[in-house]
Amino acid sequence: MTSELSVDSPIYALLQPLEFLNLLVGPDDITMDKDFKHIIKRQWNVFMRAKGVEILGYCITPSVLRSQLEHNGVSTHQLCSLLNLNDKQDVVLAYSLLREIWSLPPPPASCDPTFALACRALNIYGEFAQHLMLPYVCIEQDLDKQLIHLSVAAHLAFLLYRHNSASTHFMPRQSYLDIVLMIKNVYFCVAKTKVDNPTTNFYLILLGTDRLETFFGLIRTAVSTDANVDMLQLGSRASGLTEVAAILAEHPEWDYSTRRMWLPVFSKDTREFTSKADHINPRDWRGNV
Amino acid sequence: MLSPFGDLLVNQRDVTEDTHEEDNPLEVSNPNLHDEGRSRLQSVPYTHEGDLEDAIADEAPRNNGTSEILIQGQKTTKAKALRHRMANHSNRSSTDRLKHVQQLPCFDGVSRVTDTDIITSSADVLGVPSLRIGNPIAVLVRCEGLVVLAVAQVNRLKFAGKDNLNELPIHLLADPTARVDSQILRLIAVTLDDDPTQVHDWCWSLQMEASCDNIPGQGVHPINPSLSVQKPGQPTFLFESTFLVTLSCNLFQELRPEDRRNLLVIKQSEYFPYQGSSGALLSWLL
């Protein structure tokens, strides 16, 4: 990102009214993107830090989080898996933890003061997590709702990062930057789509590196027992695997995807999660995008 | 593959089956079974020419039972219910590549036997007094070269190499391996709204100060302050100066010389060390 978005750019008129949007772009108005599943995973990792997460001045350590979830009826064996430090790459685990956090009710009127404060802090974080994740898992959301959610998430992240100079006590700088960059990129991509092809649909879930990771997985499968792929193997298999990827894109019902990249679907009507779809793809999306 | 000798084996009967039944070792060793089996084969002649599995499926009684069960008032399939129930019990491999190769499980089975259960188990029916996460404590810290009292809340408990315990019996706090992480509470002068009885002169403002990490358990004193619920949904703690002064003196007297040198250093802030409404530091500065 080397220069401000040019006034002559066709997307300038669409993005300029957004007051707090950073308009720095690279060549050809390119912007940086981060994969949303990685963002989700990192949020889980943040909660597993020994020093915890400082939310509006209150430090939420794994122990505090555990006691809050326990009080909300999360079973012990479920807590053991949700707060397990041995697997930092499990998207589903991260997703489940964030879902439990935003499901926490407000503190009861007659509870312990420290417990109530921790609960309120987690409620605010839950709001942030919900706004960050719903655009990617709630398949009934329209594009405008998705953008509103992401905007709220960016503002809440900004508030929590800035409040009381929490900074890295809230989350690592890189994580915060990645969230903001991801949201900024969404707005830029929507604007570009509106200019380039205004009649087409824009699927938020196609941003990120899912397709690339899937292709990487196919290559790893094709080279069988080798841990990594060399140039020769890549050259000989890439074209064939591209065809495989194209076939799977044409027939999503054949594509079981990877278990670690599976995300449950959220229904806005029932406010519950459903496993009707094995994984979310454009075909499942019911919102007006 | 299906024609090792030129003829397709599908739908062909093995001729030796009927003529050389004695080749079956089970039947040889058990003459009763032999007779019974032969009589059954003789009474029911083999007539099937198609796929055996299809025939079994045709003959099998139809399963009229339902696979649905009720879980918390909601109808769901047994398979789904079992999957949800066992989701957190599965011993799946770690996604970490190195651990995966070592066939280490995704979830550590050893640590799943909760650490707290081992440490806090007690034969006492009423349980032993324990320090729990979120409990208020009093500790002495050093700030700007002075030893001052800090009222904090417990964020993390460590004992004997175990981390993130839910609670720790108070008698184990004296153990050298016991460590407590906490965050200081911001105390301010009490108002009439917080304490109409005017017995207390300090209250927690529901704001937090700096964190105090890795405090030795022996330097921690659990306290049980009075509770104010004057503001709905915002309960807070109330303190008396006399109590805090006495507590500070006691804690200071219990400190060994090496403990005094190793007191945790906390940066001064607008509200810490605690100050009275006049701005002067409290008398329980040691």
Image: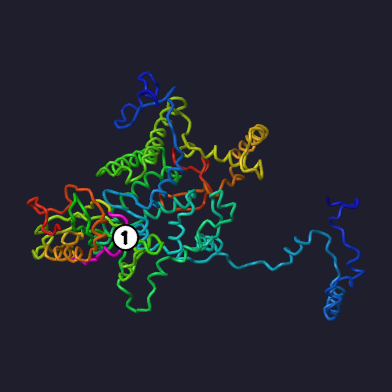
Left or right: A114, with B198 as reference point: right
x then y, percent, for residue B234: 21, 58
The extreme top residue here reads A8
Viewer-proximal residue among A219 and B109: B109
Q: Mark 1 lies on which chain?
A: B
| A197 horizontally vs A246: left or right | left
Q: Residues within 10 Å of mark 1 (few under 14, many from 20)?
A: many
Residue type at mark 1 is Val
Image quadrant occupied by the C terminus of chain A: top left
Q: Quadrant of the N terminus of chain A?
A: top left
Residue found 9% across the figure and 65% down from its top: B197
Side of B9 where A226 appears, left or right = left
Task: Give me the residue at 90% from left, 68% from top.
Answer: B18
Name the one closer to the observer, A282 or A211. Answer: A211
The answer to which of A226 and B32 lies nearer the viewer is A226
Callout 1: SS: strand
Which residue corresponds to mark 1?
B180
Q: Above or below — where is A52 with respect to A288?
A: below
Furthest residue to the right?
B19
In the rendered structure, the answer to whether residue B54 lies left or right of residue B255 reads right
The magenta stretch spans residue B164: no
The magenta segment is B212-225
Residue positioned 44% across, 38% down in the render:
A288
Q: Determine whether A232 is above or below A124 in the image.
A: above
Where B225 falls versus B32 (above or below)?
A: above
